[in-house]
Amino acid sequence: MTKSTRSDTKSDAAFPRRGHDHHRCVADALSQAEALCAQRGARLTEIRKQVLALVWESHAPIGAYQILEKLAESGKRPAPIAVYRALDFLMEQGFVHRLASRNAFLGCGHPDTNHQAQFLICDSCGSVAELADSRIVDAIADRAGRSGFAVAGHVVEIQGTCPDCRKAAHA
């Protein structure tokens, strides 16, 4: 199991504000991925960049076949294996996470740190906030260890309602 190496802050559970600049999120994610790949000696190919940009296009999880459809809209339809290989690379590098309950992918806001994330998923709008709370990781490892279980990894997905949807429901 990988222990979280980052400090826990209030911004860990930040949902994007409605109307924020998604283009900025995409540009920041691509810039950070390029810098980290250069530092790590990894190759960020054009298809990997395109897939990463599509994952970051919104803060809702996106499936591999949705990515394929969006790529096809630009005139080129890559083979499904190319998208899956790109997603595998992006996960290995820590640029995206896979949400098991949705069989979909989400951009990682902290690709420069080794961490086990937890996800808050809004049932109303589909947006997701990433947590990286080491206390949760430690509690899972401790409880599993007391059961004689060796944790290799985990996915913690919490479903509920984001602040914007809660606010809208009360208005």
Image (cartoon, rainbow, N blue to C red):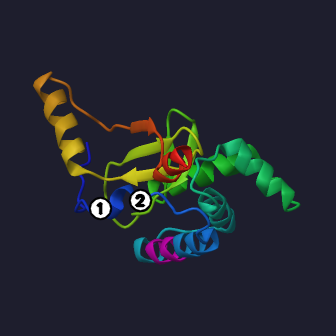
Residue at 64%, 64% in the rendered image? 53
* Residue situated in front as seen by the camera: 7 or 169: 169
CB under 8 Å between discs 1 and 2: yes
The residue to which callout 1 is attached is 10
Q: Amino acid at mark 2?
A: Ala
* Quadrant in which the N terminus appears: top left
Residue at 59%, 61% in the rendered image? 56
- Residue furthest out toward the left: 146
Report, in whole angstroms, how far the alpha carbon at label 1 lies from the one at label 2: 8 Å
SS assignment at label 1: helix
Q: Is residue 84 above or below residue 75?
A: above
Percent across and percent down for residue 160 are 45, 38
Percent across and percent down for residue 3 are 22, 50
The residue to which callout 2 is attached is 14
Q: Amino acid at mark 1?
A: Lys
Task: Name the side, left or right, on which 111 lies relative to 7.
Answer: right
- Total marks shown come to 2
* Residue situated in front as seen by the camera: 145 or 156: 156
Q: Is residue 3 above or below residue 145?
A: below
Secondary structure predominantly adopted by residues drawn in magenta: helix
Percent across and percent down for residue 99 are 50, 41
Q: For the magenta stretch, what is the residue range?
A: 31-37
* Residue situated in front as seen by the camera: 22 or 82: 22
Residue 78 seen: no
Q: Quadrant of residue 7?
A: bottom left
Whether residue 35 is in magenta: the answer is yes
Disc assigned to residue 77: none
